Image (cartoon, rainbow, N blue to C red):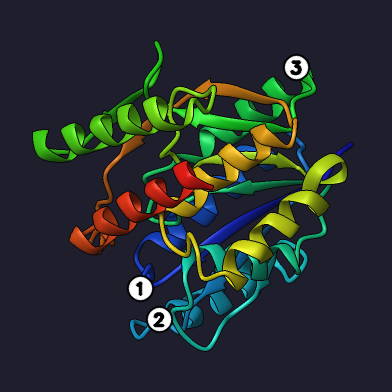
């Protein structure tokens, strides 16, 4: 049976990390899916790493893998760092703030097995998907961002700005890692636009992509990391992708 590595980049997620970890373990263990959770903490001042250490004592070092970093170095480089620790033949990337429910991971796995896709991405914008807890402004911002990306890039997926995905490691992780590392070295797509660039480049490289409808729920604990700076970074990243 295939082994799955769940990457959880964290910054100030001490309240959310125990719950999302418990849900991941519950969802996958009851289906006898072998996995590990890799916590990539960027030196959170709220003690997230200490919480992760306690979780490691509860679930075991084989299940909870700690991959801390000295500070906030960007979401893209966090994935690169996590991939260096991943033992799985498949890698799942998701948020640690409970906006991505682990119950969808088995659906990603089932879709991958049915389609043999290299990437399975969650989408909020097909039947069965949705967004909960956002005000009208954030919903409109997300819709507009996706519309602009579709017009500009024609990515072939319905939710380009989403960040809940499963990647096949054996077939394409080497190429994906090269793209990730190149993005970091060029200081491009360090933030939330990183996931968008990964899908665009993966499609260009000929990797197959399938979609699974998901529901996105706004965080309960902590503050959202999506602000004006991230919106500006998204527009800059989209512009650079269009011209590259």
Q: Earlier in the sequence, mark 2 or mark 3?
A: 2
- Where is 111 relative to 185, above or below? above
Kindly identify the residue that appears in the image at 59 percent across and 62 percent down: 183
Residue pointed to by mark 2:
44
Frontmost residue, 55 versus 213 = 213
| Residue 24's disc number | none
Q: Residue furthest front?
A: 243
Kindly identify the residue that appears in the image at 29 percent across and 36 percent down: 145
| Rendered location of residue 7, percent (x, y) | 61, 57
- Spatial CA distance of label 3 from label 1 is 37 Å
Q: Earlier in the sequence, mark 2 or mark 1?
A: 1
For label 1, the SS is loop
Q: Are marks 2 and 3 in contact (CB under 8 Å)?
A: no
Residue pointed to by mark 3:
115
For label 2, the SS is loop
- Of badges 2 and 3, the one in the foreground is 3
| Rendered location of residue 55, percent (x, y) | 57, 70
Q: Are marks 2 and 1 in contact (CB under 8 Å)?
A: yes
- Where is 187 relative to 231, above or below? below
Frontmost residue, 148 versus 95 = 148
- Where is 241 relative to 110, above or below? below
Give the total of numbered labels: 3
Residue pointed to by mark 1:
12
- Spatial CA distance of label 2 from label 1 is 5 Å
Q: Earlier in the sequence, mark 3 or mark 1?
A: 1
Kindly identify the residue that appears in the image at 57 percent across and 69 percent down: 186
Binning the other alpha carbons within 10 Å of mark 3 as few (below 14), some (14 to 19) or many (20 upward) gives few
| Rendered location of residue 81, percent (x, y) | 66, 71
């Amino acid at each position: 049976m295939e082994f799955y590595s769940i990457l959880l980049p964290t910054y100030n997620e001490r309240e959310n990390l125990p719950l999302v970890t418990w849900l991941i373990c519950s969802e996958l263990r009851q289906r006898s899916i072998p996995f590990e959770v890799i916590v990539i903490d960027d030196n959170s001042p709220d003690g997230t790493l200490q919480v992760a250490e306690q979780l490691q004592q509860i679930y075991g070092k084989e299940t909870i893998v700690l991959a801390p970093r000295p500070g906030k170095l960007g979401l893209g480089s966090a994935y690169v760092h996590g991939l260096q620790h991943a033992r799985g033949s498949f890698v799942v990337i998701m948020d640690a703030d409970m906006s991505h429910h682990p119950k969808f991971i088995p659906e990603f796995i089932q879709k991958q097995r049915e389609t043999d896709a290299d990437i399975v991405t969650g989408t909020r914008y097909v039947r069965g998907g949705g967004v909960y807890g956002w005000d009208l402004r954030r919903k409109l911002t997300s819709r507009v961002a996706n519309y602009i990306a579709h017009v500009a890039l024609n990515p072939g997926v319905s939710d380009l700005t989403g960040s809940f995905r499963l990647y096949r490691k054996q077939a394409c992780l080497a190429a994906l890692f090269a793209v990730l590392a190149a993005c970091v070295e060029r200081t491009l797509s360090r933030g939330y636009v990183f996931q968008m660039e990964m899908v665009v480049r993966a499609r260009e490289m000929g990797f197959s992509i399938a979609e699974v409808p998901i529901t996105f729920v706004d965080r309960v604990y902590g503050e959202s990391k999506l602000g004006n700076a991230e919106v500006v970074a998204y527009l800059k990243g989209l512009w650079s992708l269009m011209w590259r």
